[in-house]
Image: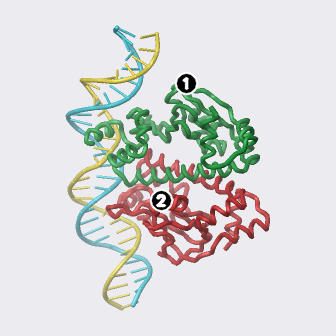
Chain colours: A red, B green, C yellow, D cyan
Amino acid sequence: MYDIFFNHLEKKIQLNESEKELIKSFFLPKKLKKRQFLVVEGHPCTFMAFVSKGLLKAYNIDEKGNEHINQFAPEGWWTSDMNSFFSEEISFYSIDAMEDSDILVITSTDFENLTLQIPIMDRYFRLLFQNSLITKERRLISSNTHNAEEKYRHILKNNADLIKRVPQNLLASYLGLSAETLSRLKKNI
Amino acid sequence: MYDIFFNHLEKKIQLNESEKELIKSFFLPKKLKKRQFLVVEGHPCTFMAFVSKGLLKAYNIDEKGNEHINQFAPEGWWTSDMNSFFSEEISFYSIDAMEDSDILVITSTDFENLTLQIPIMDRYFRLLFQNSLITKERRLISSNTHNAEEKYRHILKNNADLIKRVPQNLLASYLGLSAETLSRLKKNI
DNA sequence: GAAACAGCTTGATCTAGATCAATTATTTCA
DNA sequence: TGAAATAATTGATCTAGATCAAGCTGTTTC
């Protein structure tokens, strides 16, 4: 359970055994069944979660009832409603499991203590957020620059693995397309 | 020149005088005339810049010649092509000054040294990137969820100050709209 | 093992916003 | 100050992709 976790951390920072023990103590392992919720929109998001097995999705439902997917979180990824987690506001997203999943969760007060007690964790999260920011930026530009087909081709090239695990209608939502449009454009490829 | 800078840092972290002196030594003050470039698309982006006066924009020009604005950076903001800065790839964005500006620049090797020598700077940038990430996420969701008018109303409410300084056609580009569409929808408000 | 459901496809129609083009402000700076 | 460049408006037209609707799998469930 913690193997993948420390493996992931040690790609960005170096940790000794006592630090690892301390870090461990801040996290709580949790199992989620398929369709089980980690965060429900409108409630405070008290967890940040590292996915060690499975696949979660973070999404928002708009007034018209359309689902907009913010993030797919497979193994090795973090997920949370960051705004709610760090600012105590209610969450905008719901997060649930698309597959049976194993996760490690940390609360916001423990997150604060973790970074204060082990400053190198600030570096870890600085690097993590830095990379997420770059990715998110690309997605935003793509969303304004590319047409439906280009968006699909792009994800096909860069996230081929993920696509196999995600139903097509949710992939469409992630790309900001209707399910019908995605279905149609796939024929022409 | 450094007042705004340390003011900004000290909203997130505490620094003593010797740390401030050391931090200062990593940065180079620079003046940009209106229309002067900090980064040119296709070249490596070797700087990350803190804006202490003025206004910059980061943007990309697509194959059709349309300008897509990624970021407006007024006083108190950071700007860079983060992907290029941190990974040594060529930059996707150009960055230039929309007004005469004063900035503080740091190179990527100095950035690395800064965070290694003063670990609390990792915390500062963790918090900075964390907030940017939340903002960027919101913009992405808005881009897929809201129509033209909702996008404009949103920015009008949250960035009223910026709007006054930015020509309408660039604001349209930032929102992912054509200049004509923005002009037309403003009449109905 | 039938019923309910979830996901995918296909067709017909509609529309928000893009594009093209011309006109009118507004800045800029020689 | 006034010519040139830049920005904003307005009109006419076009189109990518949404929406609505129906039928077609395959798969979960009790």
> Can I make out residue B180 in this image?
yes
Q: State whether residue B26 is above or below residue A31.
A: above
Horizontal side of residue A14 vs A76, given as left or right: right
Q: How many marks?
A: 2
Q: Do labels 2 and 1 share a chain?
A: no
Chain that bears disc 1: B
C-alpha separation, residue under disc 2 versus residue under disc 1: 39 Å
Badge number at residue A70: 2
> Can I make out residue B109 in this image?
no
Q: Quadrant of the C terminus of chain B?
A: top left
Horizontal side of residue D15 vs D6, given as left or right: left
Q: Could you tell me which secondary element the residue under label 1 belongs to?
A: loop
Q: Residue B91: x, y in percent? A: 59, 39
In this rendered view, identify the residue nearer to me: A163 or B133.
Answer: B133
Residue bearing the label numbered 1: B33
Residue at left 49%, top 30%?
B98
